Amino acid sequence: MHDQMVFVAAVTVLGVLEQAYFSLQVIYARRKYSVSPPCITGPPEFERVFRAQANCSEYFPIFIAILWVSGLYFNQAAASLCGLLYLYGRYQYFRGYSKSAQGRLAPLYFSAKMLWVLIGLSSAGVINYMCQLYLEVDFLRYLKQLIGL
């Protein structure tokens, strides 16, 4: 079982490290712009870093849940690749938002698309598994045969 999910686990650890990096950037911004906790307002430069980190943290539980469901029920490689692309998009989002509010938009749309792809893979995998379990039909196997995999 462990070898079957090692890539998804690696993407999970990478995601956690990315979240830690974003949190550290807020700490550095607090020091740079003299914004002491619990304050969350300050110069626009600080507020953009703070909001970028908060937004990334808000989506992280959704990302982790669908990453694992799509890896378990659809395909580990596809889930891991989409997960890496999502994390890249979130990194670009954080960098862009930290510089300007407009800088967040393109990476935001990209990472949202990756989330929707993961949601689609998760849904397809769960539905297929339920069909296997209760209807004895494997749509993914038929699809693989149809495209020659």
Image (spheres, rainbow, N blue to C red):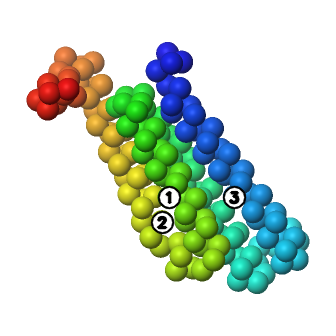
Q: Do the residues labelled 2 and 1 touch (CB within 8 Å)?
A: yes
- Give the residue pinned by disc 1: 89
Q: Do the residues labelled 1 and 3 touch (CB within 8 Å)?
A: no
Image quadrant containing the C terminus:
top left
Marks 2 and 1, Cα distance to the nearest angstrom?
5 Å
Q: Looking at the image, which is closer to me, 146 or 120?
A: 146
When asked about the image quadrant of residue 21, the answer is: bottom right
- Give the residue pinned by disc 2: 107
The picture places residue 28, in percent across and down from the top left corner, at 82, 66
Q: Is mark 1 on a helix, strand or loop?
A: helix
Please name the residue shown 40% across and 33% down the image.
77
Left or right of residue 115: residue 147: left
Q: Outermost residue toward the left?
A: 146
Depicted 104 relative to depicted 136: above or below = below
Labels 3 and 2: the sequence-earlier one: 3
Q: Where residue 31 is drawn, which disc sits there?
A: none
Q: Is mark 2 on a helix, strand or loop?
A: helix
Q: Where residue 22 is drawn, which disc sits there?
A: 3
Labels 1 and 3: the sequence-earlier one: 3
Q: Mark 2 belongs to which amino acid?
A: Pro
Q: Mark 3 belongs to which amino acid?
A: Phe
Residue density around tag 2, few if under 14, some if 14–19, many if 20 or more, within 10 Å: many
Residue 46 appears in the picture as rendered:
yes
Marks 3 and 2, Cα distance to the nearest angstrom?
16 Å
Q: Is mark 3 on a helix, strand or loop?
A: helix
Q: Looking at the image, which is closer to me, 106 or 37?
A: 106
The picture places residue 15, in percent across and down from the top left corner, at 60, 45
Depicted 62 relative to depicted 50: above or below = above
Q: Mark 1 belongs to which amino acid?
A: Gly
Left or right of residue 124: residue 96: right
The picture places residue 138, in percent across and down from the top left corner, at 20, 23
Labels 2 and 1: the sequence-earlier one: 1
